[in-house]
């Protein structure tokens, strides 16, 4: 799927209320989970101990940190869109975040995004993105949230 190209606030605003796109799937490996555990100091066994998870976890394998899946949003969003003519992009906030389903090791996830709203705040585009992290072959998403980004168009 080709990226959606956005060159101006007006082009962005024309997508309001529409699904913008879906990213390719991204596999989450145990190595990635372990690196995230090291970075965040969250080494809970459900994430990092495959042997214990196989015997004690209801999922029978390790699971990715919820915040690891959330941290993939910028990368996956970049697979969906190319926003040109900006001087800066700022993560502004997350609203209504709900982790719906754990992501097990080696699962593949993708991001589905709809533009809920966009506002021009004195030359800064405030985009509210309805974001759903889907898990391959699983009807329940990993999470859903409204991701709010600020685009400073030139």
Image: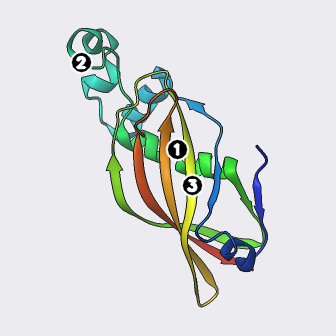
Q: Circle 1 sits in a helix, a strand or a loop, which is it?
A: loop
Q: Estimate the x, y position of residue 26 in percent, counting from the top left.
A: 59, 33
Q: Are marks 3 and 1 in contact (CB under 8 Å)?
A: no
Choose mark 3 or mark 1, whichever is in front: 3
Return the residue nearer the eye: 37 or 71: 71
Residue occupying image coordinates x 50% and y 54% = 131
Q: Is residue 23 left or right of residue 53?
A: right
Q: Circle 2 sits in a helix, a strand or a loop, which is it?
A: loop
Residue located beneath label 3 in the image: 113
Mark sitting earlier along the chain (2/3):
2
Among the 4 quarters of the image, the one containing residue 83 = bottom right
The residues tagged by marks 1 and 2 sit, at their Cα atoms, a distance apart of 24 Å
Residue located beneath label 1 in the image: 72
Q: Estimate the x, y position of residue 107 in percent, counting from the top left.
A: 49, 25
Determine the residue located farthest toward the bottom in the rendered image.
Answer: 122
Q: The C terminus is located in which quarter?
A: bottom right
Q: Estimate the x, y position of residue 8 in percent, counting from the top left.
A: 76, 76
Residue occupying image coordinates x 35% and y 21% = 62
Residue occupying image coordinates x 35% and y 55% = 97
């Amino acid at each position: 799927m080709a990226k959606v190209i956005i060159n101006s606030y007006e082009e962005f605003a024309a997508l309001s209320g529409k699904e913008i796109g879906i990213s390719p799937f991204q596999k989450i490996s145990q190595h990635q989970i372990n690196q995230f555990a090291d970075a965040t100091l969250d080494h809970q066994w459900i994430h990092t101990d495959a042997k214990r998870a196989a015997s004690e976890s209801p999922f029978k394998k390790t699971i990715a940190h919820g915040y690891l899946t959330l941290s993939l949003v910028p990368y996956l969003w970049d697979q969906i869109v190319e926003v040109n003519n900006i001087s800066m992009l700022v993560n502004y906030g997350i609203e209504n975040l709900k982790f719906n389903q754990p992501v097990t090791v080696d699962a593949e996830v993708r991001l589905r995004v709809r533009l809920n709203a966009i506002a021009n705040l004195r030359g800064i585009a405030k985009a509210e993105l309805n974001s759903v992290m889907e898990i391959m072959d699983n009807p329940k998403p990993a999470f859903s949230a409204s991701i709010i980004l600020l685009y400073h168009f030139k």
